Image: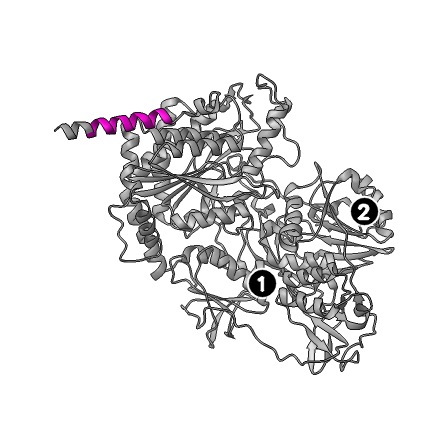
Amino acid sequence: MKNYLLYLLFVCLGTTNVLAQTPSPDEFLGYPLGSKFTPHQKVVDYFKKVAAANKNIQLQVYGKTYEGRELLLAVISDPSNMDRLEQIRTNNLALSNADKSAKATKQPAILWLSYNVHGNEANSTETSMRVLYTLAMAKESNVKDWLKNTVVIIDPCLNPDGRERYVSNFNMVSGVVPNPDPSAREHSEPWPGGRPNHYYYDLNRDWAWQTQIETQQRLVAYHNWMPQVHVDFHEQSYNEPYYFAPAAEPVHQDITSWQREFQVTVGKNNAKYFDENGWQYFTKERFDLLYPSYGDTYPLYNGAIGMTYEQGGIRAGLAVITSDGDTLTLKDRIDHHFTTSIATLETVSTHSEKLLTEFKKYFEQSATTPPGVYKTYIVKAQNIERLRKMAELLKRNHVAFSFGADRTLNGYNYENQKLENFKVERNDLIVNLQQPSSVLANVLFEPQTMVTDSNTYDITAWALPYAYGLNAYALKEAITGTYTFIEEKKESIPAIAKPYAWVMPWNSIKDAQTLIALQKQKIKVRIAEEAFTIGGKVYPAGSLLVYRTENEKIIKDFSKILSEIAKGNNVSLYPIASGYVEKGKDFGSSVYKLLTMPKVAVVTGQEVSSQGVGEVWHFFEQELDYPITLISVQSAGFLDINKINTLILPDGTYTEKLAEQLSGWITAGGKLILMEDAISLLVGKRPFDIKKKEYPEKKDKDVNERRYAEKDKDDLQNSIPGAIYKVSIDQTHPLALGLGRFYYTLKTDEKIYEPLENGWNVGTLKANSYIAGVAGEKVKKKLATGLLYGVQESGRGSIIYLGTDVLFRSFWENGKQMFTNALFLVN
């Protein structure tokens, strides 16, 4: 008995010691939570402090941002669960792998709470500290009970770089006392704002594509846990009430009835607490479940219950007067997000057994009876490097695939949208949907996504074969490949003691990286603007050539350097014995143009889309490893052709003055690349030969029959939230080299242009160019024919018109080829 009393005393003292060592957010920060915005490092320090003092918390640093800030997870549960945490995790993964031996019983559900994916929606990181403290202390008996059935994972900030940008600016411009007047400068952000990450990417649209380092590292951690429920905390306009699930239409057809039902269950419990407090909220509006790369849809397509919660608060600062005349404070916003955090924990704990049972069933059904019409997708290996990139993306998303089946099959052809026979070749990529990840795989590959409501929040088409520019087939039968790897085809390359030249391919980003490496070593590289045949081998237009003599004159150990670069980039060098060709032009012809290294700048600033700038900036630094100068719009008008000879104007709204200032620079030899709405700058301006194509309106105007009740719905006839179109390509032009006969573009507006009278119409829409996604009938008529991509010469310079976003969110791989052509091949 004495020993037992000593044990109880020890436990009590230990508990008291933990309570004493665990500071509240107010105590640790030195100010009341919600009275200031907390810098990221202080948030990290608080999480580490609380975790160090509590055995029921495990802290995991899962990576760093581009700017070096830590990304971390706090894993919290009842001590009995923490003692067997690894067992819980591995058993949960077995459930997600459709392992029939895995048990869904005696297993807590996993709830993952993601805060602050958008940096200027800054309330939720503050909320995460309050949630952490509440769960760590578990003073209330109900919280203790909930944690027995639940493992909670908290990510306090998905986007530290963006949030720090917002917080730093707010602290710099705000006064001692918050000014609630919406016109006060603390309620405005300088360009580019705090919403995106370092490269101005929206991380909430990057879950499936994983182009950004934050997403890549987070998804490794996510797939190591595979939660049953994931909540993504956001903010919207400060004049809006709170939003929580259930979601709005359209809801993708592959989302199960159970997933939809549980959103309702969660929503009703959230509503109960909001009703008690008299807080306003809405559900089933605005926030749909279609686009696969959100923080709610991606978990849904991976077997979880994915949900978005939206608190009014963007630009609210510490306090703001709303349009209703109320004052919304940061403390209010924390209260709301905290309430839904804890209410969701309650719901998950209460229904943990059902959640786990349905989770297990979800993956078992996925592996045996996959969703959708098609059971297999086969992607042709017409461009090995782009196929490799697709395989890498599938691997990151835990989608299984194989290669080659040596069979003739019948399937739906993505290119002509018809059923036809085709032969499966050795390196063709095969995705058999009889696998645990079948839902996500089907969503990423389905040729047409069914959309039940045009009022969608994002793009409505994204099928990977179109994005990667690779033809594919969809089959109604399940086919499995024979191989697990791409076969490296070893060509017999003749040994020539003293080559006249070497030839290299040009059809991938890897080839561009090779060109850059060669030019950095001062090696002269030429491009063949026409195909030629030598030694019985046909080399297509776009092939790169390196002449021996013109390089040996200026570079010591030239042959060795050339060989090392080719080997380092895994690029084949084909030695050529003579400059005399069998077909085509001899190597002394002017069709073999010398390529020069572009000196590139991109325009930034208030007039420019930050996303457009970010896509260019990220592509140069993270994929090409090529120098780029970011300049202001004001500086763009005074360029020195000797320092900057290539200028990129991303999507934006520019002034006529800039057009006038650039005309002389172009004439002197400058290359101007205009992207999306930047083209509008030059419409009707001399000497730019670009005209917007106008669609003639009917003289007898149709009566507007829209009902007032539909005021919040898209006008379907004029809607194009994001649809895929097939662009006919002039394959002989340098801008189109490596693209093939067609280029598939994502069209997000109705803008199209008249064919150039004095230029090259490289990419045009012709009849029946529409492929997939929502596009209203009036939009389809406007986009029936016209120019999207063209090149115009002006003096010694050139203007390149890119009428769509060819770098869209960095996952539109085929567009990168066109953009690279514009940079390096178009002179």
In depth, the one of 591 and 434 nearer the eye is: 591
> Residue 400 has which mark?
none
In depth, the one of 9 and 33 nearer the eye is: 9
Q: For this view, does 370 lie left or right of residue 583? A: left
Q: CA distance from mark 1 to mark 2?
A: 38 Å
Name the secondary structure under disc 2: loop
Residue 39 x %, y %? 54, 30
Work out which residue is located at the far left of the displayed protein and give it.
1
Is 324 placed above or below 346 here?
above
Residue 798 x %, y %? 81, 55
Tell me the amino acid under the disc marked 2.
Gly
In the rendered view of the protein, which quadrant contains the C terminus? bottom right
Q: For this view, does 70 lie left or right of residue 509? A: left
User: Which dot, 1 or 2, sits closer to the camera?
Assistant: 1
Work out which residue is located at the far top of the displayed protein and give it.
177
Instruction: Write the residue at 27% across / 28% down.
Output: 141
Instruction: Write the residue at 84% across / 43% down.
Output: 661
Is 373 placed above or below 533 here?
above
Name the secondary structure under disc 1: helix
Residue 14 x %, y %? 28, 28
> Residue 684 has which mark?
2
Tell me the amino acid under the disc marked 1.
Arg
Label 1 sits on residue: 386
Q: Alpha-carbon neighbours of circle 1 within 10 Å: few (<14), some, or many (≥20)?
A: many
Is 497 placed above or below 510 here?
below
Give the mark, 1 or 2, whose residue is nearer the N terminus.
1
In the rendered view of the protein, which quadrant contains the N terminus? top left
The answer to whether any part of residue 186 appears in the image is yes
**Predominant SS along the magenta part:** helix
Q: Alpha-carbon neighbours of circle 2 within 10 Å: few (<14), some, or many (≥20)?
A: few
- Read off the magenta span: 7-21
- Asked whether residue 14 is drawn in magenta, I would say yes
